[in-house]
Every structure is written in structure tokens, then in C-alpha cells.
Amino acid sequence: MTIGIQIHQLATRLWSIDRSLTGDGVRETLRILGEVAPGLRIHEIPSGTQVFVPKEWKIRDAYIIDPSGRKICDFRSNNLHVVGYSTPVKDRMSLEALQKHLYSLPDQPTAIPYVTSYYKERWGFCIAQSERDALEDGEYEVFIDSELFDGALTYGELLIRGESEEEIFISTYVCHPSMANNELSGPTVTAHIAKWLLERESRNFSYRIVFVPETIGSIAYLSRNLDLLKSRVVAGFNVTCVGDDRAYSYLPSRHGQTISDVAIKHVLAHIGGEYRSYTWKDRGSDERQYCAPGVDLPMASIMRTKYGEYLEYHTSLDNLVDVVTPEGLEGGYSALRLALEAVERNCYPRTTVLCEPQLGKRGLYPTLSTKSSGVAVRLMMDLITWSDGSKSLFEIADLCGAPVWDLYPILETLSEHRLLDLLDKPATS
């Protein structure tokens, strides 16, 4: 079974769970993700905490009964039908009165929109425009069985220790109901990245992985952990919209010059051909908080099609059939994994000999001359010629015109033969 299929199956399992900023849906989602990423710890921050943690929202049922007795906007058939954080209601009203509480998309007549009202109490239903247009005059029964109460905001955190206390930080969010690319692709890909990291025999860096409600969750997490993160995090990735197979995208950190930025641009240049490169003006997810002035964590975003840039975004059309595919998820997973490996293995190689080394006596020169062996030798010599200790492995790979992962086995071989020293930082002289 491919990794893409495994991730898609996890997303399918999580699909019907009703998630919001708070509530049991988030807790259940984190519990299931913890089965893939053992050691995931659950934390809660009480409602009213001074980072605008809202009340907890619980919904049990919701629907509308039309004049003919037909049930429409049934929460149990699609949880997008109810405006997030709707207050309870049980009433009868005319179509004219009901229209004030309905939300639809005239330009997408078959789509149910995703609408929320976290900080102002109201109730409402989301409906496809085609169904709204067909509503008949008469009396409607509306019912929402929900409650708002002082509870908690829930998030998950996993710390995977490596040889160093320096950390790579990975964040994704778990607060949207049934939408595939915008929501489920991020946490499901991240959970399998965590599984891969846990299964590795060794890691140079430690990894801190968080599953938070978007925006308020990242703000709340930073309020508890900012000093620790600023002292330890050397690279970071915000993971969202990594499940479709239409494109690859990159959104930079605020200054665009972190090793995370370098890694993403290098990986995407070598796996996806052309990719969409955005600017900080295009921000819109949790990178807004992680890269805010005074926070300035080295966070960049690696994506497939960026949020807000595909037609199905924030609607019921963002599904696990037409938008998110096993192939798309595997591509998102592979891109993130390659970027993490590249940061993990980055170094500043420095040759230990003057002039070009004699490769033959060390058994490093092929005994059979072929086209492929010639290319391999050329790449080895190019690596050596740029290894003066001042250039990172990323820079050398770019100078060689090769993906950085093609240099890994050569780097290991030359290091084993003591022809290269692998420095953690650029040489000063």
C-alpha cells in the first residue's frame, strides 16, 4: 500500500467528524492522529484565557423542515450545513424571515459554503444556491441543538528528540469540518511525517510537531511557548493544503531568507518543475502568527494548490474524490519529507586535501567507463571543487545543477575517506 493511500484512508476516517475551534470533534481527531503518531500529547487552554480563547461549542443536531415536511440542511448528512458556532434555535418562520439566516454561493450553485461566527452569537444554515432557489413560500421549522459554554481549546503536541536540542518546528491545524485539501490534508500528511520521523534510527535535530486550531490555536500556543521556540527552533514548516495533484506552491517566511525557505524552493525546483511562488502579501494561514514581528520563527509553507487559489476552497466541493487524491497526498508528503531531510543533512563541506584528490587509489573511481559513470565522477568532482567550507550543501547543489539528495551518498563516501570535513557552520577562514 502506497503512503498516499495510507494518508487518504486516514483522511477518510476523519472526514465526518465535526471540527471547530473547540470541542469534542477536535479531541476525537487528535485521538485518531495519535494512533499514527504515538506520543502525541493533548493540551487544553480554558475558555476566556487572555488570548481570546472562545467558549466551547457543542452541536448535536440541526435541520430545517420545509412546508412540505421535507428535511433540508441536515447537519447529519453534511456538517457544513450549519454555521459554525451557531446558537441553539427552535422556531417556526416564514421563508422571508429564514432567508436572513441562509448562506449560499450564487456563482457556485451546487456548493455548500463554509461559514463561521466564532465571536458573535448568531445562528444560520449553509445551503447550495440551487436548493435555495427552489425553496417554496410557506412556514419553515428550524432546529439547532447546540450549546456554548466555558470549556477549553484543545491542541496536540509531539516532541521527537534528536541528537541536538535544536528543533525543527512543524505546525498544522485541526479546526475545519468536512473539507479535504484545506483541512484534512495538513494533519494527515503531518501525522505520517511524524510516524516516519519516529521510525528513523537517528535524527540530528529534535522535532516539535503541533496540531492546533487555526489562528487562535497558534496564538495560544505561542503564548505558552514563545521563549522556548525562539531559543531552539532553527527551521519550521506550516503544513496546509498538501493534498491535491494540480500544483505545488511555496509561501515564504516574512523575510523569505530562512533555511526553511531555501529548502522548500530547492525541493520544489527539482520535483515539480514549475511551481507557484507567492509573497508575504499572500499570507493567510498560521504563518501570520509564527512570523509576526517579535515572534519571527523561521516558518515557511510548502503546499500543493494554495488556500484560496482553487475554486472548491471553503466549500463542500473540497472533497476526497475530486480534489484530494492519494497521488496528491503522496506528493505533498514527499515534498515535505525531502525538505526536512535537506535541512537535517545540510552542512558546510570542506576539503581536507590541496588540489584534486587521487580517487583511484581510494577505490572511488569507476573501473568501467560509461556515460553514467562519467556523470557520477563529474558530480563528485564538482562537489569537491566547491567544498571550501564557506558554502552550504544547498548552495553547492545549486552550483552543481543537481538536487541536494543526489549529493548525499557522495558526501558520505568522501567523508568516510576523510576527504571532506562536514562543518555545522560556515568556515570563518
Image (spheres, grey):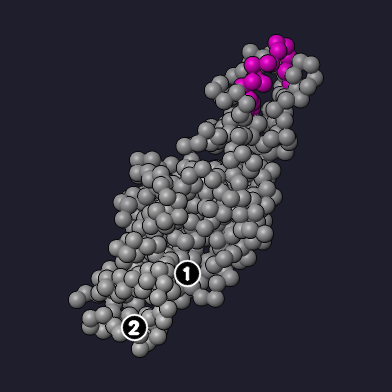
Q: Magenta segment, which residues? A: 123-141
The residue furthest bottom is 361
Q: Is residue 56 magenta?
A: no
Of circles 1 and 2, the one toward us is 2
Whether residue 135 sits left or right of residue 311 in the image: it is right
Mark 1 vs mark 2, CA separation in Å: 36 Å
Residue linked to disc 1: 206
Whether residue 243 sits left or right of residue 379 in the image: it is right
Q: Is residue 353 above or below residue 304?
A: below
Neighbour tally class for label 2: few under 14, some 14-19, many 20 plus, Cα within 10 Å? some
**Quadrant of the image containing the N terminus:** bottom right
Q: Is residue 139 magenta?
A: yes
SS of the residue under disc 2 = loop
Report the front residue among 52 and 214.
Answer: 214
Residue 301 in view of the camera: no
Residue 359: give its label.
2
Dividing the picture into quadrants, the one containing residue 235 is bottom left
Q: Position of residue 363 (x, y in %)?
A: 40, 85
Earlier in the chain: of badge 1 and badge 2, it is 1
- Kind of residue sitting beneath label 1: Ser
Q: Is residue 107 above or below residue 40?
A: above
- Kind of residue sitting beneath label 2: Leu
Report the front residue among 128 and 290.
Answer: 128
Q: Is residue 381 above or below residue 169?
A: below
Q: Position of residue 295 (x, y in %)?
A: 36, 54
- Residue at 53% x, 53% y: name it: 331
SS of the residue under disc 1 = strand
